[in-house]
Amino acid sequence: MTTIIIHENALNFEQSNQIKRALSVPEKVNNHFRVTVDDCSAEKVAELSDKLSIDMNILPEHFNPSEIKLLISDMDSTLIGIECVDEIADMMDLKPQVSEITEAAMRGELNFESSLTKRVALLKGLNTSALQKVFDERLFLNPGADTWINGLKEKNIAFALVSGGFTFFTDRLKKELKLDYARANVLDEKEGCLTGKIQGDIVGAEAKAAFLQEICNELGINLNQTIAIGDGANDLLMMNEAGLSIAYHAKPKVQAQSDVVINRGGLDKVLDFLA
């Protein structure tokens, strides 16, 4: 049997009727709907999802929500609605140039490590007070984040935040949101200004996947007991290792390689997989 998740708290008459005709009668489960059918292709679900403008996913047969003990999430454009490096660059009137590199890297067109090195080099000389300004004035959580995080805590699922961005932001989010783990790059600074370099090894795709395994080892769980969510190409190694990979408003390359996709709803929709 195939279970299809419909990520909507309410369906209008037309949506319900079309789902019934194409699949079966949708049944309410907590804050979403589900349909169980003998068999259904991913293409058919995707077409219906687009037609109705709602998120719909086939629940992978290998996924067991009762066994999940850890969720690992990307930060920029996943947990939060900005790319921090782009907003920092805006303090130097360099946002267009840096954003272009960021976008190409997230699409998988550029090597992440070298592209980050290039972007950070452009920040040389910026006063570190600009980082706090970005955090205070520009950083915001994506829709549904609070509900999502609280829901995971209620289920005793640990939350790890990992980023190709910077510890200045991940550490503060970890503290404010009471997250369990966080890892990111350390911006080098001297006399209150950025040097244009990163301290230590860069947290890229391989490091993200390694961080996931590291936490699994610490918790004494296996990778099948984890969920990974992200939006960019540098999240794919981590996502491919997890028991369930979720592409959140992600680049096409990431959507194509993920188990499930959330394109319209907020982060609270992740909880639908854990019902």
Image (tube, grey):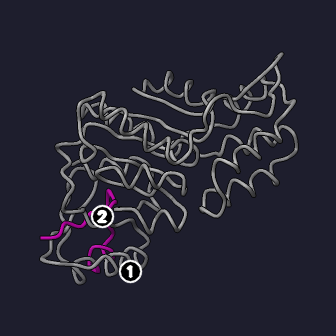
- Cα separation, mark 1 vs mark 2, equals 13 Å
Q: First in sequence, mark 1 or 2: give its number.
A: 2
Q: Residue at x 74, y 28 (%)?
A: 133
Left or right: where does residue 54 sit relative to residue 217?
Answer: right
The one of 45 and 33 positioned closer to us in this rendering:
45
Residue 88: image x %, image y %?
76, 38
Residue 42 inside the magenta-drawn segment: no
Residue at label 2? 6
User: Residue under circle 1?
Assistant: 47
* 138 horizontally vs 211: left or right: right
Tell me the quadrant of the picture where the N terminus can be found.
Answer: bottom left
- The kind of residue tagged 1 is Glu
Instruction: Give the image location of residue 269, x and y in percent.
Output: 36, 52
Write down the region rendered in magenta: 1-18
Furthest toward the front, the residue is 201
* Left or right of 31 in this view: 82: right
